[in-house]
Image (cartoon, rainbow, N blue to C red):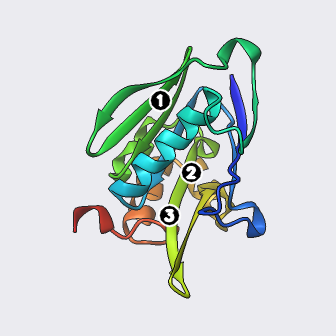
Amino acid sequence: MLRAIEFKDKRFETKDDYNFFDITSDNMIILCNNYRIMHFLTDEIINTVNGKAEYNNYDCDENDIGKAKSLLCFKLQRIIEINEQKITLALEPSIIYKANKISDIWLFDCNKKDGIYKEYIYPIDIFKGSCKTWNKGKGKDEIYKNICNGQYGTYDGNWIK
């Protein structure tokens, strides 16, 4: 199982560990802001596990090294498979209904500052109240609604423009 990746490419924001992806299960979901960065991150994860992005640090079982592959490549979604583990990257926020726990949901975005784009990845559960919302009776529905309303930052509907 892949457990973590520290992205070291200069494209990633390193402040506050926005370049650290802590994998909590075999069913991870990453909601991306746009098509371009979704495909970049997919390739970066696959290349890291397969030894082609040696500049990244990662924690992975020995039998998983070299086993990452693209299981699905679609405009709205990408699925990476590493033996039995799956990482789903998507543009449409309804993908969160696939999650089993809130720690499975991550967001990936980029910002332009001083003419330079910086990309960052972060878990949705860092937002105040998100875990409490998830644990309520309609947790996934409320999380979905909050994502669509822009409460968690990344999602702004940019992918449909």
Residue at 39% over, 71% down: 149
Give the labeled residue for mark 1: 80
Q: What residue type is labelled 2?
A: Trp
Q: Which amino acid does label 3 sit on?
A: Asp
Q: Which residue lies furthest to the top in this view?
A: 63
Which one is in front, 131 or 29?
29
Give the labeled residue for mark 3: 109
* CA distance separating discs 2 and 1: 15 Å
| Disc marking residue 125 | none
- Residue 129 placed where, x, y %? 64, 65
Residue at 42% over, 32% down: 79
Horizontal arrangement in the rendering, residue 57 relative to residue 109 (left or right) = right
Tell me which numbered mark, 2 or 1, is placed earlier along the sequence.
1
The image shows residue 105, relative to residue 10, as above or below, that is above
Q: Which amino acid does label 1 sit on?
A: Ile
Secondary structure state at the residue bearing disc 3: strand
Evaluate if marks 2 and 3 touch, with contact meaning CB atoms under 8 Å apart.
no
The image shows residue 115, relative to residue 62, as above or below, that is below
User: Of discs 2 and 3, which sits in the foreground?
Assistant: 3
Evaluate if marks 2 and 1 touch, with contact meaning CB atoms under 8 Å apart.
no
| Disc marking residue 106 | 2
